[in-house]
Amino acid sequence: MNLILLAIAPVFLIIVYIYIKDKYEKEPKRLLLYNFLLGSIVSIIVTTILYFLINIFLPLTDHYSISQQFIKAFFVVGLTEEFSKYIIVRYYAQPKSAFNEPFDGIVYSVMVSMGFAATENISYVIQGGYQTALIRAFTAVPAHATFAILMGYYMGKAKFSKNRIVLNLTGLLLAIIFHGAYDFFLFIDYVPGIWTGAFISLILGILLSRNAIKKHQERSRFKDS
């Protein structure tokens, strides 16, 4: 039980942080919960199915091949995981009437992503123990949050734009790029010191995420209400 609590603690800290940052018009708690649950169940199922299919048609077996690890990071892990989150935000959250300002793109994207991260983190922490819980609390879980914020920033803009398709896909692409870059540097751990690239990617993602949050806060239609 303690391991599970440690696994989900960083997830809920991020959720609380984003909820607080949604200053001017809070989202319905039930809808937030539904998005979290869809992320924790449906996104995981979609990702698992896609992993299975990709492994059949594109088996990547050489751990020491940089090109294979690049494909795995960007086109297997990054693409499948972010796509599985994207479809929930795009087809469940974005059409809702409660999604009524650009910042909501960040809120719902983070809820879906944190649902995914909670399930994933519990699995890793149960296998790896307390050390894994501590490491992932400061790396993988915040990374999932930054991918979500960057995707949600553009999906929030998309709802109120004539260029909805372009902006939605821009958000998805950006999340894939950052997710892929983060994982790629970790996958090629046999190259001395290369793992630092993952932290540089994470720090850059955090900085861009903070800027994205600030921009949507400033543009809120409810700011002066």
Image (spheres, rainbow, N blue to C red):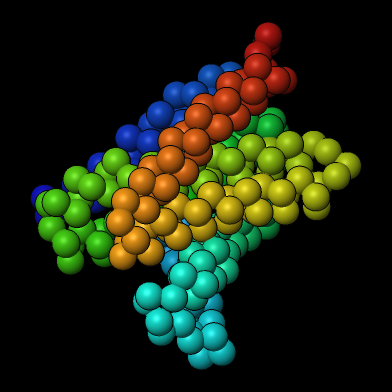
Q: Can residue 75 be seen by looking at this rendering?
A: yes
Q: Could you say which is closer to the camera, residue 8 or residue 204?
A: 204
Q: Is residue 58 above or below residue 104?
A: below
Q: Residue at 49% of width from left, 24% of height from top?
A: 21
Q: Residue at 19% of width from left, 54% of height from top?
A: 132
Q: Is residue 68 above or below residue 130?
A: below
Question: Image quarter for residue 124?
Answer: bottom left
Point out the residue furthest to the top here: 224
Point out the residue furthest to the front here: 192
Q: Could you say which is closer to the camera, residue 181 or residue 120?
A: 181
Question: Image quarter for residue 119?
Answer: bottom left
Q: Position of residue 101 (x, y in %)?
A: 69, 30
Point out the residue furthest to the bottom here: 56
Q: Residue at 29% of width from left, 41% of height from top?
A: 138
Q: As drawn, is 94 to the left or to the right of 111? A: right
Q: Residue at 51% of width from left, 67% of height from top?
A: 70
Q: As drawn, is 89 to the left or to the right of 81? A: right
Q: As drawn, is 134 to the left or to the right of 163? A: left
| Image quarter hosting the N terminus | bottom left
Q: Position of residue 13 (x, y in %)?
A: 32, 35
| Image quarter hosting the C terminus | top right
Question: Image quarter for residue 64?
Answer: bottom left
Q: Position of residue 77 (x, y in %)?
A: 48, 66
Number of labels in the image equals 0
Q: Position of residue 134 (x, y in %)?
A: 19, 45
Q: Can residue 15 be seen by looking at this rendering?
A: no
Q: Could you say which is closer to the camera, residue 78 or residue 34?
A: 78
